[in-house]
Amino acid sequence: MWRALQLGSRQGVVFLILFISAKLLTPEELGVYTYTIAFGFLFSLYADFEISKAVSKYVAVFNISDPEKVKAIFFNAALTLFTIIVILTVLFISFEKEIVGKNYIYIKYLLPLFFFLPFSSLYDGIYLGLKKFKILAIIALIAGAISVTATYFLISKYRLVGTFLALDLYYFLLFILFAISYKNYSFTIDKKLFTVIWKYSIIIGISGLGHFLYSKANVIILGKFNFFVEAGYYELIDKIFMLFTFGVLIFGQVIAPKVTELYTQKQYKILFSYFKKIVLTVFILGVITSLILFFISPFFMQVFLSKYLTENFILMFNLLLIHLPLIFISSCIAQPFVIGTGFAKYSLITIPSGILNIVVSIILVKDFGFIGVVYGVLAISIISKLFLFYLIYRRLRIA
């Protein structure tokens, strides 16, 4: 329960900040924000490169086999993280005009995010490894409540700049609360430990990069072609979908231990039957959700975000609903049937698929405008997800 609450609060805070921003800013201002912040998340992805997830694994392992090593994990990981952040920050600022374009003036407001997001993720990984879900949830709720409350006042006073400040505040509070509550420090360098964590983070980091190539990359492409309003639409739709997939994501994490147990015990027939049943159920749920959203979204937008109830938004929203059932399935099976069964290498399919998505989107946006990006992500997303499902289906069937 605490884990679900912690995940829900973090996702909810990001959505609420975006929702309040959409309510108070113009569609073009929201687009500029989502376009610029995408570079912030890209920076954090390269800086962190999933070190936090690697830390989570090794904290859990060493907490049982060698508790003293747990104390050294934070310092070794933090030292690496800080070095990468400094190097990337210098490079990013040196070429900010070339990278971001005319909106480079907002990059200075992302500098706190460059530091606090990766380090709050590092603390998050340590607490996960220690299974301190209650503390994680409490910290996330406190930071979230303060940040969401402050968001309204910051945006009301500083407009677009206030949106960046609100996100900075959230990750700053997470970092401070984590740093205050964590006591298990040991300032010793362990080269072997550093190497192990770094190697594992590279593997799962590559998969995380693939996800970015699908989500934030499309926002950047739209912004690069001056479709800032549509970039805001895309991000808003992505966050709406994220909220609706949260339930199946948690369900996947809940069933993961059972799936791993069945696979370890070589109960392949039972596991294969379980897989088919879950995929079918989640797919039906996804179809029903898509139909409900298709009919209620105009009403919702009219009530809460009427200035976004445009022909272009509805067109993008309805087209992207086509692949929502597949997003449901991929979110559900990722932890139990991809990672839990040792098929994690299949997740690397997101890299070539993500690169292809960027290439196709750039080509189509030139010919069809903003809607070309939607066509591109739909085609590549559907094909890659179906291919991943096929690989897992075939592997479980013949196991």
Image: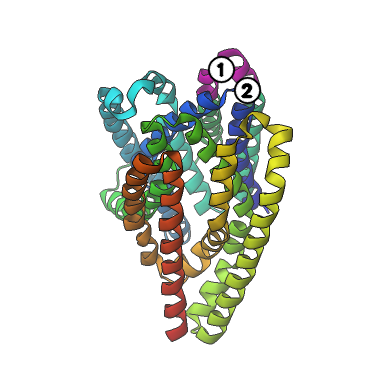
In the image, residue 9 sits, relative to residue 168, either above or below, namely below
Q: Which residues are magenta?
A: 150-165
Residue 388 location (% of width, % of height): 42, 67
- Residue on which the image places disc 2: 24
Which residue position holds label 1? 159
Q: Give the image quarter of residue 398.
A: bottom left
Magenta stretch secondary structure, dominant = helix
244 or 125, which lies in front? 244
Q: Position of residue 341 (x, y in %)?
A: 46, 72
Where residue 333 appears, as percent x and y from the top left, is: 53, 65
Mark 2: secondary structure: helix
Picture coordinates of residue 131, whole percent (x, y): 56, 54
**Whether residue 114 is visible:** yes
Viewer-proximal residue among 80 and 116: 116
Residue 308 is left or right of residue 339, and the answer is right
- For residue 148, what is the image quadrant? top right
